[in-house]
Amino acid sequence: MKDWSFRRLVITAGPTREKLDPVRYLSNESSGRMGWALATAAHQRGARVTLVAGPTNLPDPKGVQVVRVVSARDMLAATRKAARRAHAVIGSAAVADWRPQTVSRSKLKKRPGAPVIRLVANPDILATLSKERRGAFPRLAGFALESDNLLANARKKMRGKNLDLVVANSPRALGAVRSRAILIQAGRPPHRFSGDKKNLADLVLTNLLEMIRSHDE
């Protein structure tokens, strides 16, 4: 099945790292597996895929253009560039919400008392793309990782960022092989999913493709 043929798709995946000093950083436990599953499934379905990936131990998926990045700002720059001609962008990366206000050029030394680290907000990648979007494209899908009030918080994120589709899941999804998730789209009841990430990837791609085709018609 090559139903994504002649269409361009951008996927973000994995964690980002925000440096404290030359050897320390802020990050999270994202493995990147969900993004890899999306990129692999999209390539198999004929899409021209760009995978913007934070630091992971995963090998590059075959047939996929991979752009390796480190920080949230790196990921934003690479994603904006790749999204210019894309039909859709899927934000599956676990992007750091904050970064240290200053980065020490030398290793921070152990001293009496705990150090004070001031944080500043990182740019929101999908929200930025949404504000810059002109017309229907690119279609935007995101992941909402929520520990409380999963459905309500995911819907709030969807409205706030003006996304077309949101996949809501819990922190248990980080690093897991299988997923339990809820797909949310405007005008449709929530779709509950339980299974491996390959099947979840195909479900997300099928729903996004329906939106693209509805505009083409």
Image (spheres, rainbow, N blue to C red):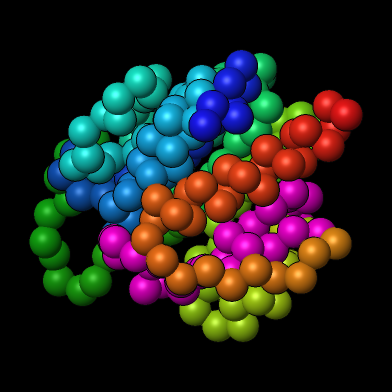
Residue appearing at x 68%, y 27% in the figure: 87
Q: Work out which residue is located at the far bottom of the displayed protein and give it.
A: 149
* Residue 58 vertical placement versus 143 (above, below): above
Q: Residue at x 60, y 36 (%)?
A: 89
Q: Position of residue 52 (x, y in %)?
A: 43, 31
- Place of residue 104 in the rendered image (x, y in percent of width and height, measured from the top left): 27, 42
The image position of residue 155, as x and y in percent, is 72, 68
Task: Examine the rendered structure and indicate whether residue 192 appears above or below residue 64.
Answer: below
**Whether residue 190 can be seen here:** yes
Q: Position of residue 176 (x, y in %)?
A: 30, 64
Give the answer, above or below, for where 116 lies relative to 55.
Answer: below
Q: Between residue 132 and residue 13, name the one nearer to us.
A: 13
Q: Is residue 141 above or below residue 150?
A: above
Q: Is residue 132 magenta?
A: no
Residue 121 visible in rendering: no
In which quadrant of the rendered view does residue 35 lie? Answer: top left
Quadrant containing the C terminus in the rendered view: top right
* Segment colored magenta: 160-186
* In this rendering, position of residue 173 left or right of residue 29: right
Q: Residue at x 27, y 29 (%)?
A: 60
| Label tally | 0
In which quadrant of the rendered view does residue 6 lie?
top right
Farthest front residue in view = 1
Is residue 174 inside the magenta stretch? yes
Front in this rendered view, residue 79 or 1: 1
Residue at 56% x, 52% y is: 203
Q: Nearer the viewer, residue 150 or 112?
A: 150
Instruction: List the single residue furthest toward the left.
Output: 110
